[in-house]
Image (cartoon, rainbow, N blue to C red):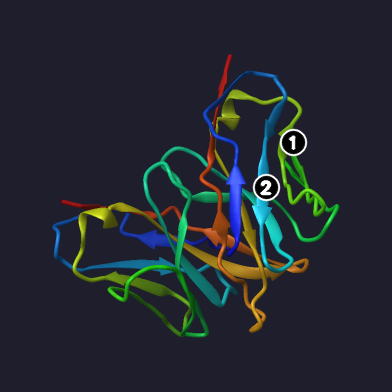
Amino acid sequence: ETGVTQSPTHLIKTRGQQVTLRCSSQSGHNTVSWYQQALGQGPQFIFQYYREEENGRGNFPPRFSGLQFPNYSSELNVNALELDDSALYLCASSRLLAGAYEQYFGPGTRLTVT
Amino acid sequence: GDSVTQMEGPVTLSEEAFLTINCTYTATGYPSLFWYVQYPGEGLQLLLKATKADDKGSNKGFEATYRKETTSFHLEKGSVQVSDSAVYFCALSTLENTGTASKLTFGTGTRLQVTL
């Protein structure tokens, strides 16, 4: 079973630019979630996609947007980058097992905004 | 809203010592509880889970019991190894009306350092 993959691994952008991060879900998982993890903090929920539609959103502004494709891969887009957007961005796909949804995380994309 | 509180780190232990990392939660529904581990430079790995009161999750020598009366899910291991050095996150999740998983709400993480 292939795990969750993310690309790129690292990225450096300038304030005001736009960025697209990509995620390939684990086979058979139809739900994908994105999280932002600032240095030394726990991950914060950005949004979730289920069957190609947004299915929940955290406290992030609209310049954070996403897509989910029919093959359950996903993108996270961030417009007008700010310095505080520097973080590890984690993608997680979900499966239902024994009465609970387990979320499996990719290795993350480290975004640095200068 | 939902929240998770973990004990502050870092926790420094000698190899073979007993580990406890405290975790308490607040949730409006009836959550599932998780422990995730993050090794340096990596993403999160699911360590164990529990879905209902008095359930005990276990994996790789780690255990945690879902205590509804005290809203706690403390992580324990009887004998830690140097390879257990990592950051440990307690988290909760509830099912949405759509039948899909809600977001994971994480604690701030507890760094564990095990020395020889």
Asked if marks 1 and 2 fall on the same chain, the answer is yes
Residue at 60% across, 62% down: B2
Residue B24's disc is 2
The C terminus of chain B - image quarter? top right
Of residues A22 and B4, the one drawn nearer to the viewer in this rendering: B4
Residue B81: give x, y in percent of width and height: 64, 25
Residue A68: give x, y in percent of width and height: 43, 80
Of residues B8 and A79, the one drawn nearer to the viewer in this rendering: B8
Residue A72's disc is none
The quarter of the picture where residue B59 lies is top right
In the rendered view, would you say A87 is above or below B11?
Answer: below
**Dot 1 or dot 2, earlier in sequence:** 2
Residue at 71% across, 69% down: B29
| Left or right of A46 in this view: A97 | right
Estimate how packed mark 1 is, as few (under 14), some (14 to 19) or many (20 or more) residues with alpha carbons within 10 Å.
few
Q: Is residue B89 visible?
A: yes
Q: Amino acid at mark 1?
A: Gly
The quarter of the picture where residue A79 lies is bottom left
Q: Amino acid at mark 2?
A: Thr
Secondary structure of the residue carrying tag 2 is strand
Secondary structure of the residue carrying tag 1 is loop
Q: Is residue B60 visible?
A: no
In the rendered view, would you say B113 is above or below B6?
Answer: above
In which chain is the residue bearing label 2? Answer: B
Of residues A11 and B97, the one drawn nearer to the viewer in this rendering: B97
The quarter of the picture where residue A35 lies is bottom left
Q: Which residue is mark 1?
A: B61
Front tag of 1 and 2: 2
Residue at 39% across, 61% down: A6
In the rendered view, would you say B41 is above or below A44?
Answer: above
